[in-house]
Image (tube, grey):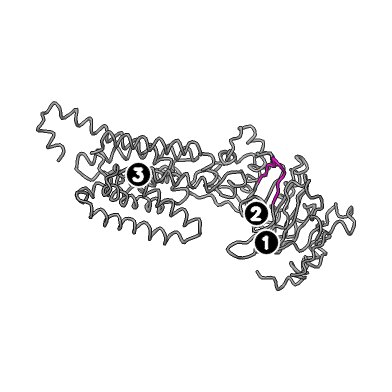
Amino acid sequence: MSGLPGGRGMSGLITAEHLSVRLEGQAILTDVSLSVQPGEIVTILGPNGSGKSTLLRSLLGIVPAASGRVTRRAGLVIGYVPQRLAIDRTLPMTVRRFLSLPRRVADRDAAAALARVGVPEVAGRQMADLSGGQFQRVLLARALLARPQLLILDEPTQGLDQPGEAAFYRLIEDVRRETGVAVLMVSHDLHVVMAASDRVICLNGHICCEGTPRVVSSAPEYRALFGLGTQGALALYQHVHDHSHDAGEGHAHHHHHDHGHDHDHHPA
Amino acid sequence: MRITTITTTGMTMITTLLDDFLIRAALAGVGLSLATGPLGSFVVWRRMAYFGDATAHAAILGVALALAFDLPVTFGTLVVALAMAVTVATLAARGWAMDTTLGVLAHSALAFGLVAVSFVPGARTDLSAWLFGDILAVSRADLAYVWGGAAVVLALLAWRWQALLTTTLNEDLAHASGLDPARERLILTVALAVVVAVAIKVVGALLIAALLIIPAAAARGLSRTPERMAVLATLLGAGAALAGLQLSLWQDTPAGPSIIAAAAILFALSAMFGRVRRG
């Protein structure tokens, strides 16, 4: 338990150190430490109720820490894409207007952002009339307009079909390549998201395992969390980065002696 | 009744006097709409309708307390409405079941207010004015309160407009943008209390929430952006105030209900027009 996972400590854009979060008396997160480096894509995987969204909300400062702390690099600009955004039918809101919240942006920038995420035609449409895929892309466009160093995405492909999901993650990778933005995202689906990640963190109230997608997918903790049936499918999504990591470095292994590996009995 | 007293002072003066109190009443209605249009839009967007009711009903208690302690009525209603609005907002933040909580608070406040008023000598006879409004009896001081209150509310909303809209859309999104959703909620709470305090004379405690909601709801079908909806709600609210005023003058109907009835007709027209336009 020495040092931080991801290793490089203070150079991170955002860092959680021994973070614990309690909501209504229940421990949601216990002793979570992680750090996101510039330009890196980190995916947090975990079953429903594992505290993924709470972790993101805690990193954003929405949910207070019960112990431990979150530090952000000074002046860090975060672009946030929430899990769901239910726009009330009573609130008229065009896509163009939405992009100017809370900071007004020039028409030219708004059009460029929409074009970048592949929906240049929707500027005049009502947000409530967009399809699921268009909606997520507009949320991403709005997040990008703040020129963030870090994008935080909470299950950004919920409600998209498989091709839509794959296209969305490709878009995230393209944006990262072009702008160098770091990405921290959450998912409960393993397949498509793995391919786009540099590093995967398995969460179930605490960090169970962490490493490159390939190393994590073969970790026993990961199999205990998600079952063994997914192995075959994961083989399809091997990541190009995998070969470059030594065995010891790629897989930061967390031994929680109080929990052991008894994940099946972890309270939901 | 008012008109009969006036007739004794001679025909020439009638028109000027009529003009005067009518102009005051019209100005009060229009001034109030400047605040209720944009604020009412937020009440609709954030589904705060019942919240508005609770705050407005509490104002009756404020009236009773102000009269009992010989304080300005606007001050009394402002303080009690603010206390109620803050209580409701706090309970909501703590996760109380809002439907039930507001049901309890809104009606209890009204009941306690009515009971309290009955102890105040003289206030009993004016009760219907507090409940249903008495826009034709608006004084110059009342007018100053209405316009002052409307100016305060408009300034608050204009100052925080972008932040309020972002918070209304999604509180996490607002938080991630560096805003404090709790602060924005508090601003709406204060604005609501101010509107209640100055509106009670015009439409009465029972119908303040209706003046917030109905023009905004009527504007929704005709709007593509939040700003347009707020402006349209203001115009429709002002139109309803003037129409209701006419009705009240001609038929001696209670002013508050007349204004709300006019707003409801505008809403029905907007709903029909919106439907036709959508095909």
Which amino acid, by three-letter code, is at mark 2?
Ser
Could you tell me which secondary element the residue under label 2 belongs to? helix
Which residues lie in the magenta part? A70-79
Cα separation, mark 1 vs mark 2, equals: 10 Å
User: As drawn, is B13 to the left or to the right of B183?
Assistant: left
Name the residue beneath numbered marker 3. Answer: B197
Residue A219, image x, y percentages: 82, 65
Q: Are marks 1 and 2 in contact (CB under 8 Å)?
A: yes
**Residue A75 lies in the magenta-colored region:** yes
User: As drawn, is A239 to the left or to the right of B122?
Assistant: right
Could you tell me which secondary element the residue under label 3 belongs to? helix
**Residue B58 lies in the magenta-colored region:** no
- Chain letter for mark 1, please: A
- Residue B257 visible to an observer of this rendering: no
Name the residue beneath numbered marker 1. Answer: A29
Residue A134, image x, y percentages: 63, 47
- Residue B8 visible to an observer of this rendering: yes
Residue B31, image x, y percentages: 35, 35
Residue B247, image x, y percentages: 24, 41
